[in-house]
Amino acid sequence: MESARGDEASARAETPLAVRTTEVEDTSIRAFFDAAREAAVEDAGFGTEPASTPRAVWRTPESGSVAAYGASATCEANGPDRFASIRSRARELFAALESDTDDSGTPGSFGTSSVPETTDGSSDPSTSEAPRVARPRLFGGFSFFPDAHEGPWRGVPDARFVLPATQFVSTDEEAWLTAIGDARAVESRLLDLRDRLASAADPGPPEPSVIEHAERTTSEATWRDQVDLALSRIDAGALRKVVLAQSLRATLDRPVSVPEALSRLADTYPDCFVFSFPPGEGHRDFFGATPERLVSMRGRDVATGALAGSVGRGETDAADERLASSLAASEKDDREHSLVVEAIGDQLESLAASVTIGDRRVRKLATVQHLFTPIDARLAEDEHVLSLVEALHPTPAVGGLPPDVAAETIREIEAFDRGWYAAPVGWFDAAGDGTFAVAIRSAVAEESRATLFAGNGIVAGSDPAEEWTEVQLKYRPVLDALGL
């Protein structure tokens, strides 16, 4: 195991690292994890899955699903420079991948070579380049604030990204399996997993869970006091907006099955970013289904958006449309949404040659409706997606305005550490392209315990009782996903 460690960042990688890719028949993410776990158990020679085996899932409506198992390398960072630290170490990791595969064979772009099957069933690693979707990516996320490590985040770094041992990509047109690791073994590992996937049975429907104990970090009375305090600062002119959050700790009757929860989330929220990442060592998973894109970047093209202002769904179509109309006409929600649009546009102006703000609309999800405005930009110069992540986080949709005053208010008022909640999660590749979402509608799970998070934007005119009701709606996606 090779390691490199500085004052604020660390990384670990097996050496040498090679990359091999093969096309496979499509299957479910749960089937992929089952096959990868079986292979890992056999390789380890134990009767159980090796400890601290990371798993990651990333699903978007426009580009399919990616599942990652194991770790060929990890990058971690702490402190306010966590974005730059991860970017720097990732550059070294990707460069090493290219170097290793250059020495060992015929790589494609980013050091990836494909492993097509010959007519006799054997593998031939000496031909074609793997497609872009199959190339290696780093998966992970950042904390909302630096040094927020209490509660379920104890021992979790401010940033953690994993270069997986195995990566499975599924789109509408194709499915690819990528293996990364020791150059002497990576090809045989890839072909073994390919064969396992070919015969894998899709897992049956998940079983429901039962909450044995639940505890809120914030009572309704305390919440009203918190909102009143925020409103007093808004009335005094110190704040324009602040997002206040709370958490719900639940103990279930059985260990949390994150793959099952993700399957439910993907079915119920097909237009959201469904994600799961390991925030630290051990069997912890941070997962959710967020409607909020922080940024996507490919080349110099950037996509983001403003998501702020919300209302519930109606029990009938007519009631639903009345609620949507009331949201669109709400002065309070218009004020909150406009603040977010303006702030994101301003943040992009310093990096972009042009910024295009689209038409506002009501975006309907299973349990809630949001005001949404798409925002696109064309960068003036080449950038890394992490530069945009750092520039945009936190958006006013999860922090507030002015940013520094809102951050101070959140730290003072909230009764828990946000950890990775409402922070950037996603992936990036060797080219510096990638996609990050804002990790709302989320939870962190360990064994049979899950801590759920939800929040709401407070602006002039906010009503504490209404804000409480709205926040409870935002727990619903993860509660449903847990089978509760």
Image (cartoon, grey):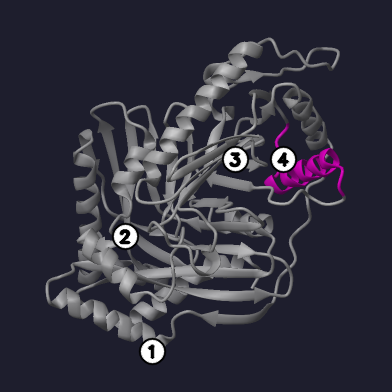
Asked if the residue at tag 4 contacts the one at tag 3, i.e. Cβ–Cβ closer than 8 Å, the answer is no
Instruction: Kindly identify the amino acid type of the residue bearing the numbered disc 2.
Output: Ala
First in sequence: mark 2 vs mark 3? 3
First in sequence: mark 3 vs mark 4? 4
What stretch of residues is rendered in magenta?
25-46
First in sequence: mark 3 vs mark 1? 3
Looking at the image, residue 88 sits to the left or right of residue 360; the answer is right
Q: Which residue is mark 4?
A: 27
Q: Secondary structure at mark 1?
A: helix
Q: Residue 221's mark? A: 1
Report how far apart the C-alphas of labels 2 and 3 lie in the structure: 27 Å
User: Residue shown at 79%/13% (left/top)?
Assistant: 118
Instruction: Kindly identify the amino acid type of the residue bearing the numbered disc 1.
Output: Ala
User: In the image, residue 201 lies at what x, y percent?
Assistant: 82, 45
Count of numbered marks = 4
Instruction: Kindly identify the amino acid type of the residue bearing the numbered disc 4.
Output: Thr
Q: Looking at the image, is mark 1 or mark 4 nearer the viewer?
A: 1
Looking at the image, residue 58 sits to the left or right of residue 298; the answer is right
Q: Does residue 34 show up magenta in the picture?
A: yes
Q: Residue 66's mark? A: 3
Report how far apart the C-alphas of labels 2 and 4 lie in the structure: 36 Å
The C terminus appears in which quarter of the rendering? Answer: bottom right
First in sequence: mark 2 vs mark 1? 1
Looking at the image, residue 210 sits to the left or right of residue 382; the answer is right
Q: Does residue 370 show up magenta in the picture?
A: no
Q: Which residue is mark 2?
A: 397
Q: Looking at the image, is mark 3 or mark 4 nearer the viewer?
A: 3
